[in-house]
Image (cartoon, rainbow, N blue to C red):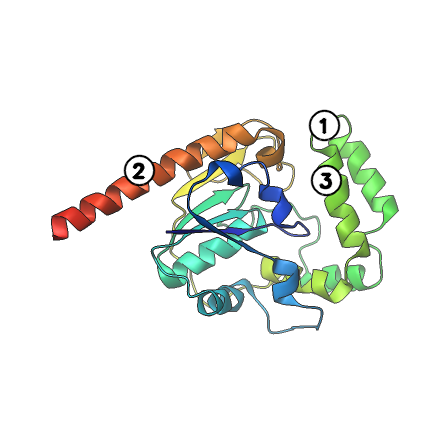
């Protein structure tokens, strides 16, 4: 069983540094920055991106996908193709769950290209109004800096994974949802979820609270698989 980790928007695989060592199994970390590339991809959406990952990494139902934020959204669409078990951390399955004051993708992309969305003034405002004094402040600042200095077309390609509608209905369900009610990036799921303290970055600020339910889930999953194999034998 492979454990495939997918980070969120603007993040890196380092987002999983405090939980991955506690999760057994062969581990693969996907770099979304590298995978979406710096060339404009107007036809990109999360569904065709997920399908490309399934092909590139030969993902099957025997793999487990763990995604944070946008990574969980990608994992959700991977499950649509493969039936893989997925764990969503601070993520979503309903498109209205991410907080976004601007709904138009075209407007967002224009703002990014012209430097109006990710800049030091916006960063200071968001830290002052949302993250001042919080344990996740430094991490949020580092992620925001990566978007200020990152390739603009790459950032837009990542945003397409969040904002571009997909052409078919997804009926897959996450196997485990982990979410903090104080999350300032993604609204609380409508479906049942495992509640954790902290905010969007609980996997860094309260890692044990995140990896413990994942470890238990994987134990149950392995037990079910072994039982299945025994019954078939």
Q: Which residue is mark 1?
A: 134
Could you tell me which secondary element the residue under label 3 belongs to? Answer: helix
How many neighbours does mark 3 have within 10 angstroms: few (below 14), some (14-19), or many (20 or more)? many
Could you tell me which secondary element the residue under label 2 belongs to? Answer: helix
Decide which of 143, 58 is in the foreground and name it: 58
Q: Which residue is mark 2?
A: 220
Q: Are marks 2 and 1 in contact (CB under 8 Å)?
A: no
**Residue 115 shows in the view:** yes
Mark 1 / mark 3, whichever is N-terminal: 1
As measured in the structure, the alpha-carbon distance from the residue carrying label 1 to the one carrying label 3 is: 10 Å
Give residue 216's position: percent from left, percent from top: 37, 33
- Left/right placement of residue 118 relative to residue 213 reads right
Determine which quarter of the picture holds residue 205: top right
Mark 3 / mark 2, whichever is N-terminal: 3
- 32 up-or-down from 222: above or below: below
Residue 46: image tag: none
How many neighbours does mark 1 have within 10 angstroms: few (below 14), some (14-19), or many (20 or more)? few
Give residue 207's position: percent from left, percent from top: 56, 31
- Left/right placement of residue 220 relative to residue 215 reads left
Q: Are marks 3 and 2 in contact (CB under 8 Å)?
A: no
Q: Which residue is mark 3?
A: 140
Determine which quarter of the picture holds residue 198: top right
As measured in the structure, the alpha-carbon distance from the residue carrying label 3 to the one carrying label 2 is: 33 Å
Residue that sits furthest to the right in the current view:
121
As measured in the structure, the alpha-carbon distance from the residue carrying label 2 to the one carrying label 1 is: 34 Å
């Amino acid at each position: 069983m492979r454990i495939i980790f997918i980070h969120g928007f603007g993040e890196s695989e380092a987002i999983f540094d405090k939980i991955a060592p506690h999760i057994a199994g062969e581990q693969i970390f996907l770099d979304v920055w590298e995978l979406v590339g710096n060339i404009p991809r107007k036809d990109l959406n999360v569904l065709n991106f997920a399908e490309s990952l399934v092909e590139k990494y030969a993902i099957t139902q025997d793999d487990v996908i763990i995604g944070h934020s946008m990574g969980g959204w990608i994992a959700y669409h991977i499950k649509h193709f493969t039936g893989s078990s997925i764990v969503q951390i601070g993520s979503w399955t309903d498109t209205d769950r991410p907080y976004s004051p601007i709904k138009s993708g075209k407007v967002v992309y224009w703002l990014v290209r012209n430097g109006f969305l990710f800049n030091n003034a916006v960063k200071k405002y968001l830290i002052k109004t949302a993250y001042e004094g919080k344990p996740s402040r430094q991490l949020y600042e580092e992620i925001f800096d990566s978007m200020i200095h990152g390739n603009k077309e790459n950032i837009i390609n990542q945003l397409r994974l969040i904002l571009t509608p997909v052409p078919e209905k997804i009926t897959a369900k996450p196997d485990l949802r982990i979410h903090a009610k104080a999350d300032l990036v993604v609204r609380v799921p409508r479906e049942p979820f495992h509640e954790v303290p902290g905010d969007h970055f609980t996997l860094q600020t309260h890692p044990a609270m995140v990896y413990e339910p994942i470890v238990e889930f994987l134990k149950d999953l392995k037990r079910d698989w072994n039982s299945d194999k025994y019954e078939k034998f």
